[in-house]
Amino acid sequence: MTVAVETGLWQLDKTATTVAVGHKTMWGLVTVKGTFAVTGGGGEVLPDGSATGTVTLDAASLDTKHAKRDKHLHGPDFFDAENHPEITFAVRGAELRDGDTVQVTGQLTVRGISRPVTFTARLTKANADAVALETEFTVDRTQFGLGWNQMGMIKGLATVTATLAFVRTKTA
């Protein structure tokens, strides 16, 4: 499938967007999963087909369906949401490759610490008014100051899973 995404400005559709994180804990025996509330985002598709933009998450919105754990994750040992209320991913470039594959490069900022992140996404919808991408990639949480690990319980990398939907707001 070869697709072309319309040039112009695009706004994140919060109702059709999900961002989740999963991480192994209990010495690799249990995977804790949670979802974030997406607070905003948008971008621009340029005439050459490349794109830039931003996705913003509410750090205090992480919901793992366990209130005590969520309070700990929102606190200073992890996301420190009181001092760093937003998690952002600033897309520096997104290029459509073979078929429906999109190569995305950008800066992920968590707890005020920014690191480059590159991942591959799959374009699942593209028409004149709507675009949707799905991706799954891993992040080393310790690179963002999330180093708490009592008794070595937390192993490996965090897995981020996202479905990002955008609607076109106007032409460039």
Image (cartoon, rainbow, N blue to C red):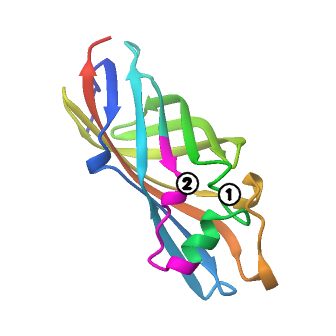
Question: Mark 2 or mark 1, which is nearer the start of the sequence?
Answer: 2
Residue marked by disc 1: 80
Determine if residue 149 is in view. Answer: yes
In the foreground, 98 or 159: 159
- CA gap, disc 1 and disc 2: 8 Å
Drawn side of residue 161 relative to residue 168, left or right: right
Image quadrant where one finds the C terminus:
top left
Amino acid found under the numbered disc labelled 2 = Ala
Residue 91 x, y percent position in the rendering = 53, 32
Image quadrant where one finds the N terminus:
top left
In the displayed structure, would residue 153 be above or below residue 34?
below
Residue 101 x, y percent position in the rendering = 40, 41
Mark 1 vs 2: CB contact within 8 A: yes
Which residue is drawn at the image coordinates 55% and 40% (left, top)?
A: 89
The answer to whether residue 77 is magenta is no
In the displayed structure, would residue 159 be above or below residue 11?
below
Which residue is drawn at the image coordinates 77% and 70% (left, top)?
A: 148
**Crowdedness near tag 1: few (<14), some (14–19) or many (≥20) residues, C-alpha within 10 Å:** many
Q: Residue furthest right?
A: 151
In the foreground, 140 or 95: 140
In the foreground, 123 or 30: 30
Residue marked by disc 2: 59
Which residue is drawn at the image coordinates 47% and 29% (left, top)?
A: 53
Residues shaded magenta? 56-68
Residue 122 x, y percent position in the rendering = 37, 46
Amino acid found under the numbered disc labelled 1 = Asp
* Residue 86 figure quarter: top right
